[in-house]
């Protein structure tokens, strides 16, 4: 293995490039037109354009990515997380193309990608799942009977779900029909798999997950656990290791269970087995067959470079460690996202007008941005991962506070003020918290809006081309430069590097009853048919974007005279959804 293609963007692409470089490997980056100047593109030895901004046309464009791998002479592919990382068909295509796949076998990805199958696998390996069903749900009556037996709340979950999506929590009979309908609809629309199943929704649970590493020679190790209970919308916000207050025997039992589940899947590479812990009991939740966002804290306390291990394992080498290392100290990761804690952590894409990362003892920042970078509505809104390490939990917490105060981000709202508040909360300080703390028992609504600094308008760039000769061979080179310096002749505007400004209020940028999409996304529900009457402020459709359902409301009262979209359509920011007169 000499040259590795990193099929991702942002901080994880940067992370993989760094590990590959540390091992002396050549790196090939891919980028969408929006990411032409991204940090990962600059850091790699070479970088290839794989298509326009929408991920479906670039970072998910399997044919183009494999074509680049071939042309660039890469002999391995690392998928990072997200995008194609847990797509067994992609893993297989990589292997079929004669390349090394840096990840688990496609069969293990497929097995764990279906939550119903993975629950069955875990149970067969002697690791019980959260109490629930292990067959797909066929009717709402089955759910009603389950609730009658186990009591509310229950969770209806999509077999293909992930990333905090595809789960509906139901608290009473009156909510059941609507939740069942929504869960089935979302499962079909988002995961192309309509199957849903049931779990008891555990109220006072902690999310504790186990990091494992397996090589091709049957060696597997448990590298410790991470507590990821601090969440909003069932997505992680803060992670720490060791899990505070977790008894040693419970930690060991969780490690054994994780190894058993991974073995049952014939696992290879880095993986994470997730559990919900209630008191002394723990239940299998799912297994993630990839490197995870929060792998960093395990690295900080074990001194094992997990991405480098993935690369070594893929090259057929045995694990560099034979037993689980004893964790040294305590590490915490704080996800710095472009979102507004004062408004239910809603995404707030935009330009990083000022951006200064903290540093100093015990502080690590994994990011893929710099000042001027755009956090685009097309991708994840993670700006950076702030990872702090201390000799003990108290020192780690003090460092986290110090580093958060050093971190300067202007131009978008961020999770920084929310983190500072979490780090002062009694339950957090006592190390005795559960998955509901952030959403149910904390209030962020009074947090001040972010300082906004605006950057000077970006110069309009045009594409030009020039013919050059290198070593006697002719090459046509495309480049972009400001309009003013344009020589006469034909030029065409470069694809915009920044998305158009987004309307903050959501609906109807078009005025006069024209309802436009405030952001790029997918239409998941339309409340009315053409010809029906609506009143101002009434929800008219639901747009799924940046992992959230966004309700679009009527800007004016009247009749829907033109309905331009249907459920399942992908729309870009500004496209007309319907016209109300
Ligand atoms: P995803 O694949 O979307 O990450 P998970 O099944 O891993 O979904 O769950 C994500 C989070 O949702 C968990 O960490 C937990 O906070 C919550 N959750 C999931 N299932 C349950 C459940 N049965 N009871 C309580 N909380 C749950």
Image (cartoon, helix red, strand yellow):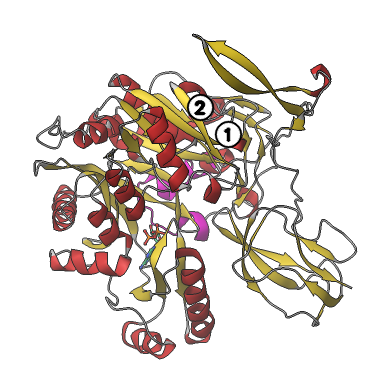
The answer to whether mark 2 is within 8 Å of ligand 1 is: no
Labelled disc at residue 41: 2
Mark 1 Cα shell of 10 Å, populated few (<14), some (14-19), many (≥20): many
Could you say where residue 228 lies in the image, as x and y percent from the top left?
37, 49
**Splitting the image into four quadrants, where does ligand 1 fall?**
bottom left
| In this picture, residue 570 sits left or right of residue 271 | right
| In this picture, residue 222 sits left or right of residue 160 | left
Residue stretch rendered in magenta on the structure: 420-441
Front residue of this view, candidates 470 and 457: 470
**Residue 186 painted magenta:** no
Q: Identify the residue at horizontal 38%, vertical 40% (top origin).
A: 80
Q: Which of marks 1 and 2 precedes in the sequence?
A: 1
Name the secondary structure under disc 2.
helix
Q: Is residue 278 visible?
A: no
| In this picture, residue 572 sits left or right of residue 68 | right
Could you say where residue 39 lies in the image, as x and y percent from the top left?
52, 26
* Residue lying at the far top of the rendered structure: 471
Q: Which residue is mark 1?
A: 35
């Amino acid at each position: 293995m000499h040259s590795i293609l990193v099929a991702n963007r942002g901080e994880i692409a940067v992370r993989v490039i760094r590990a590959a470089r540390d091992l002396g490997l050549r790196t090939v980056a891919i980028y969408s037109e929006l990411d032409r100047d991204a940090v990962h593109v600059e850091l790699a030895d070479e970088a290839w354009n794989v298509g326009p901004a929408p991920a479906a046309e670039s970072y998910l464009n399997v044919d183009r990515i494999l074509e680049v791998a071939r042309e660039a002479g890469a002999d391995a592919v690392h998928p990072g997380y997200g995008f194609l990382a847990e797509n067994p068909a992609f893993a297989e295509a990589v292997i079929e193309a004669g390349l090394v796949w840096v990840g688990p076998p496609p069969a293990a990805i497929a097995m764990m990608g279906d939550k119903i199958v993975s629950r069955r696998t875990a149970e067969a390996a002697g690791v019980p799942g959260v109490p629930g069903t292990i067959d797909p749900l066929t009717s709402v009556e089955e759910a009603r009977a389950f609730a009658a037996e186990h009591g509310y709340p229950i969770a209806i979950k999509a077999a293909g779900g992930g990333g905090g999506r595809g789960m509906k929590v139901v608290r009473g009979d009156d909510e059941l029909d609507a939740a069942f309908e929504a869960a089935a609809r979302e499962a079909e629309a988002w995961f192309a798999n309509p199957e849903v199943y049931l779990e008891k929704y555990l109220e006072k649970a902690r999310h504790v997950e186990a990091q494992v590493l397996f090589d091709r020679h049957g060696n597997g190790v448990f590298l410790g656990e991470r507590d990821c209970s601090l969440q909003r919308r069932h997505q992680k916000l803060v992670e720490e290791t060791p899990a505070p207050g977790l008894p040693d025997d419970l930690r060991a039992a969780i490690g054994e269970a994780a190894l058993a589940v991974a073995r049952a899947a014939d696992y290879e590479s880095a993986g994470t087995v997730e559990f919900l812990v209630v008191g002394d009991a723990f239940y299998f939740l799912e297994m993630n067959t990839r490197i995870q966002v929060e792998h960093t804290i395990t690295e900080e306390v074990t001194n094992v470079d997990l991405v480098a291990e993935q690369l070594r394992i893929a090259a057929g080498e045995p694990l560099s460690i034979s037993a689980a290392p004893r964790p040294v100290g305590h590490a915490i990761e704080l996800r710095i996202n472009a979102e507004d804690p004062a408004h239910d952590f809603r995404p707030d894409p935009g330009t990083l007008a000022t951006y200064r990362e903290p540093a100093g003892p015990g502080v690590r920042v994994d990011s893929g941005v710099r000042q001027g970078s755009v956090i685009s509505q097309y991708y994840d809104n993670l700006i950076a991962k702030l990872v702090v390490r201390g000799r003990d939990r108290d020192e780690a917490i003090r460092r986290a506070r110090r580093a958060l105060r050093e971190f300067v981000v202007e131009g978008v709202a961020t999770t920084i003020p929310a983190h500072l508040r979490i780090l002062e909360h009694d339950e957090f300080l006592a190390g005795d918290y559960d998955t509901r703390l952030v959403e149910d028992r904390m209030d962020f609504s009074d947090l001040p809006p972010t300082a906004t600094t605006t950057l000077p308008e970006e110069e309009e760039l045009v594409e030009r081309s020039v013919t050059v000769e290198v070593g006697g061979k002719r090459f046509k080179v495309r480049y972009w430069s400001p309009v003013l310096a344009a020589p006469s002749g034909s030029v065409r505007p470069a694809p915009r590097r920044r998305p158009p400004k987004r309307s903050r209020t959501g609906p109807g940028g078009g005025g006069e009853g024209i309802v436009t999409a405030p952001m790029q996304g997918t239409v998941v529900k339309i409340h009315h048919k053409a010809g029906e009457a609506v009143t101002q402020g009434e929800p008219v459709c639901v747009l799924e974007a940046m992992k959230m359902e966004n309700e679009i409301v009527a800007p004016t009262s009247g009749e829907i005279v033109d309905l331009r979209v249907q459920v399942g359509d992908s729309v870009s920011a500004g496209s007309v959804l319907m016209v109300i007169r």
